[in-house]
Image (cartoon, helix red, strand yellow):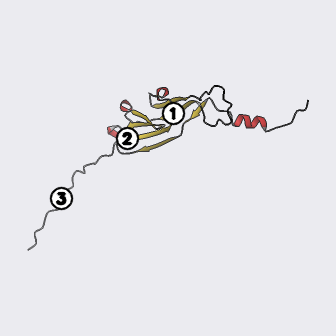
Amino acid sequence: MTVAYAPYRDARRVAFTPSSTRLAAVDLYRTDENVVLSVDLPGVDAGSIDVDVDGRILTVRAQRTAPSVEGATWLSRERQSGAVVRKLRLGESIDTENIAADYRDGVLTVTLPVAEKAKPRKVVVAGVAAAPEVAAE
């Protein structure tokens, strides 16, 4: 029996073995009214999505199930399956009582309202008198 020495075989297997938990890709931006988090969750069943807030930590969890085809021999299987998790630390400027989430077309959008105290506002300057009008003769 001949055994071939392949030092990189195990390294390739480790590098290409799906992890049990994936980090979901996100976009995050802020407007005057909200911070909006978009999480890529393609192929995820909407019923498996869980969004929760614990203190100041927002956690998004979802499960992507690999398709099962009876009698099939897979030639390529690149789409990842398993648990997807993403955590985000929320600042004091977020109103955690009014967070909303919506899942459409493989993207979870979480809207995080900015607390009233953190919204931009105009400050009135006291003690500034308007210049008197001068009539031209």
The residue carrying pointer 2 sits among few (fewer than 14), some (14 to 19) or many (20 or more) residues within 10 Å by Cα, namely some
**Nearest to the observer: residue 95 or residue 122:** 95
Mark 3 nearby-residue class (10 Å; few <14, some 14–19, many ≥20)? few
Who comes first in sequence, dot 1 or dot 2?
Answer: 2
For residue 87, the mark is 1
Q: Which of the image's four quarters has the N terminus?
A: top right
| Amino acid type indicated by mark 2 | Asn
Q: CA distance from mark 1 to mark 3?
A: 52 Å
Give the quadrant of the C terminus. bottom left
Task: Pinpoint residue 135: horizontal percent, then vertical percent.
Answer: 10, 69
Give the number of the disc on residue 34. Answer: 2
Looking at the picture, which amino acid does disc 1 mark? Lys
28 relative to 3 in the view: left or right: left
Residue 109 - label: none
Viewer-proximal residue, 29 or 16? Answer: 16
Q: Is there a contact, CB below 8 Å, between mark 1 and mark 3? A: no
- Indicate the position of residue 46 as horizontal and vertical percent values: 47, 29
Disc 1, SS:
strand
Which residue position is annotated with label 3?
130
* Viewer-nearest of discs 3 and 2: 2
Identity of the amino acid at label 3?
Answer: Ala
Q: Which residue is drawn at the image coordinates 82% and 38% (left, top)? A: 7
Q: In the figure, is residue 11 to the left or right of 60? A: right
- Which percent across, then down, holds residue 104? 44, 36
Which residue is depicted at the point 86% across and 36% down?
5
First reached walking from the N terminus: tag 3 or tag 2: 2
